[in-house]
Image (spheres, grey):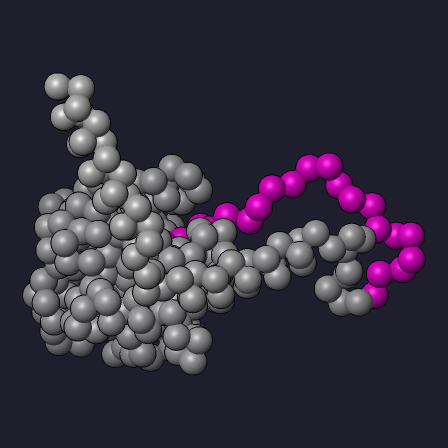
């Protein structure tokens, strides 16, 4: 019996050894990540701190004793518009693409963490939500493997909910601030696609949903102003309506506000304002 256990341990040790020796496809990019993080760590170590405007007088630096790291305040959800998770991992590890996200969720539910939550990813691009701009600086980006037209797998949604739960608790992210790329970049982005389960997310406390059962729409109701109150950039009406429909009225691919949409918006603005 003892011999059998020893044999099993030996085999297991062998497996561990083989795994440890297996060439890691991403060893090079992991080294590059470490190098870049080290450069930022050195920036934080700088003492005395150089004023961002370069106007600091000698001796004027007084280090406070009370501070912490800046925290993300939004979560932006994307679909990758690529054909596989492997393709996305490759895209996010090629310096020439200059795009990245903090998390990538594969069809089987595997979650790849690619960037420390406290660092700025390159996933949002030119974007606006309410008065917030440079959303890369204040958000976590989550990319879900999906070619842009597919439904999202149950495993992906389950993994996503786990990640969202952790992020919400870790950084105290408000319910309203779980949104999609299309929400913050109308006319430029359409992800996540209309199959994305926003209502299900909302039921778990990530993003708002609506209940139009007892909603009376005021006669002077202005749908575009309501979209603005929710957060949409209404510079272009049609683009803003398209993004709103992708999120809240997913079975309607027109870019027209209906009486039903007005009811939805009348209910939503009560939550957002
Ligand atoms: Zn996106």
Q: Would residue 73 be visible to someone looking at this image? A: yes
245 vs 56, nearest the viewer: 56
Q: Residue at x 18, y 19 (%)?
A: 2
Determine whether, in the image, residue 155 is placed left or right of residue 131: left
Q: Residue at x 18, y 51 (%)?
A: 109
Q: Residue at x 39, y 78 (%)?
A: 97
Position of the N terminus, as image quadrant, is top left
**In which quadrant of the rendered view does residue 63 lie?**
top right
207 vs 37, nearest the viewer: 37
In the image, residue 99 lies in the stretch drawn in magenta: no
Determine the residue located farthest toward the front in the rendered image: 3
Q: Position of residue 87 (x, y in %)?
A: 24, 71
Q: Position of residue 143 (x, y in %)?
A: 28, 62
Is 25 situated above or below 19? below
Is 61 situated above or below 1? below
Determine whether, in the image, residue 111 is placed left or right of residue 32: left
Q: Position of residue 270 (x, y in %)?
A: 30, 48
Q: Give the residues drawn in magenta, as a range.
A: 55-77
Q: Would residue 272 be visible to someone looking at this image? A: no
In the image, residue 73 lies in the stretch drawn in magenta: yes
**In which quadrant of the rendered view does residue 28 lie?**
bottom left
Q: Position of residue 24 (x, y in %)?
A: 33, 60
Q: Residue at x 44, y 51 (%)?
A: 117
């Amino acid at each position: 019996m003892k011999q059998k256990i020893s044999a099993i341990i030996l085999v297991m040790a062998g497996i561990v050894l083989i795994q440890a020796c297996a060439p890691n496809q991403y060893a090079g990019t992991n080294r590059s990540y470490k190098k870049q993080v080290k450069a930022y760590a050195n920036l934080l170590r700088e003492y005395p701190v150089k004023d961002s405007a370069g106007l600091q007088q000698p001796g004027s630096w007084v280090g406070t004793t009370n501070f912490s790291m800046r925290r993300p305040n939004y979560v932006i959800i994307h679909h990758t518009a690529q054909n596989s998770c492997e393709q996305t991992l490759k895209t996010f590890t090629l310096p020439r693409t200059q795009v990245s996200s903090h998390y990538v969720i594969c069809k089987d539910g595997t979650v790849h963490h690619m960037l420390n939550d406290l660092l700025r990813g390159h996933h949002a691009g030119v974007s606006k939500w309410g008065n917030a701009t440079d959303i890369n600086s204040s958000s976590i980006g989550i990319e879900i493997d999906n070619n842009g037209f597919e439904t999202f797998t149950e495993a992906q949604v389950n993994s996503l909910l786990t990640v969202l739960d952790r992020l919400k608790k870790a950084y105290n992210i408000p319910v309203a601030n779980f949104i999609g790329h299309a929400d913050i970049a109308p006319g430029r982005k359409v992800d996540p696609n209309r199959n994305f389960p926003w209502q299900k997310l909302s039921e778990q406390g990530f993003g708002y949903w609506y209940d139009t059962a007892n909603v009376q729409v005021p006669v002077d109701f202005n749908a575009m102003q309501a979209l603005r109150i929710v957060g949409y950039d209404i510079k272009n009406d049609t683009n803003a309506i398209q993004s709103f429909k992708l999120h809240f009225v997913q079975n309607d691919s027109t870019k027209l506000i209906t009486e039903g949409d007005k009811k939805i918006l009348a209910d939503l603005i009560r939550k957002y304002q």
